């Protein structure tokens, strides 16, 4: 674990809290994945039922807009872990039809959170998919759909990290300066 965090600290912020992670995608330089363990499922902190309950407690209309905008992945609370887990759940479900999922991924745009690409290639509303996962099917789907008009539009409002954690959660420690 020490070797892993020493390596990934070269690609993260110079100071501040780090998120617990089992791996990262590092886009700087030669893009690559880095993992702590061969079996990424071995690092789960919660049972599937506990994770599902955490999702139900955490996500609301404001938080899901952070997710679609990409901001929730940078949170220093459970929102970080839950964002990566929600992305994993959606990818696993959408990936069941690999050709359609591949086209969705290749066509998705940050500006609309992938909404148009999901309609075109997966035949779904992203908000409807999330509402089903969160057991919110009776809620208005618009509350869960990406709504870019509500997002901050300043260029630096969403951090563009050189490294992206997956299987992340709160770590609660200060990173050491490089």
Image (cartoon, rainbow, N blue to C red):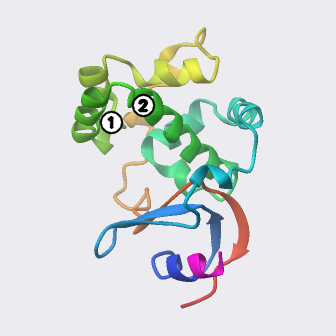
Give the image quarter of residue 116.
top left
Vertical order, 160 against 84 (above or below): below
- Mark closest to the chain's N terminus, 1 or 2: 1
Q: Residues within 10 Å of mark 2 (few under 14, many from 20)?
A: many
Q: What is the span of residues highlighted in magenta in the rendered image?
A: 1-5
Q: Position of residue 71 (x, y in %)?
A: 50, 51
What residue is pinned by disc 2? Answer: 146
For the residues bearing labels 1 and 2, Cβ distance under 8 angstroms: yes
Apparent side of residue 58 relative to residue 74 in the rendered image (left or right): right
Task: Name the residue beneath numbered marker 1.
Answer: 112
Residue at image x 46%, y 33%?
92
Secondary-structure class at tag 2: loop
Residue at image position (34%, 58%) is 155
Neighbor class of circle 1 (other Cα within 10 Å; few <14, some 14-19, many 20+) is: some
Q: Is residue 115 above or below residue 106?
A: above
The quarter of the picture where the N terminus appears is: bottom right
Instruction: Give the side of residue 114 with respect to residue 36, left or right.
Output: left
Q: Secondary structure at mark 1?
A: helix
Between 127 and 50, the one nearer to me in the picture? 50
Disc 1 from disc 2: Cα separation = 6 Å
Which residue is pictured at 30% across the width and 41% down the height?
A: 111
Residue 122 position, x and y percent, is 31, 22
Image quarter in which the C terminus is found: bottom right
Q: Residue at x 55, y 47 (%)?
A: 84
């Amino acid at each position: 674990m020490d070797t892993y965090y020493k390596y990934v600290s070269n690609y993260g912020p110079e100071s501040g809290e780090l998120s617990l992670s089992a791996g990262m995608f590092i886009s700087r330089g030669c893009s690559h994945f880095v993992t702590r363990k061969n079996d990424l499922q071995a690092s789960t902190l919660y049972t599937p039922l506990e994770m599902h309950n955490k999702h139900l407690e955490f996500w609301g209309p404001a938080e899901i807009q952070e997710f679609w905008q990409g901001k929730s992945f940078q949170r220093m609370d459970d929102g970080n872990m839950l964002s990566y887990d929600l992305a994993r759940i959606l990818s696993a479900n959408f990936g069941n039809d690999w050709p359609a999922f591949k086209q969705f991924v290749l066509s998705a745009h940050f500006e609309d959170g992938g909404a148009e690409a999901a309609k075109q290639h997966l035949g779904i509303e992203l908000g409807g998919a999330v509402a089903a996962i969160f057991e919110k099917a009776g809620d208005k789907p618009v509350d869960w759909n990406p709504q870019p008009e509500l997002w901050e539009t300043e260029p630096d409002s969403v951090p563009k990290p050189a490294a992206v954690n997956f299987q992340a959660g709160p770590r609660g420690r200060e990173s050491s300066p490089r």
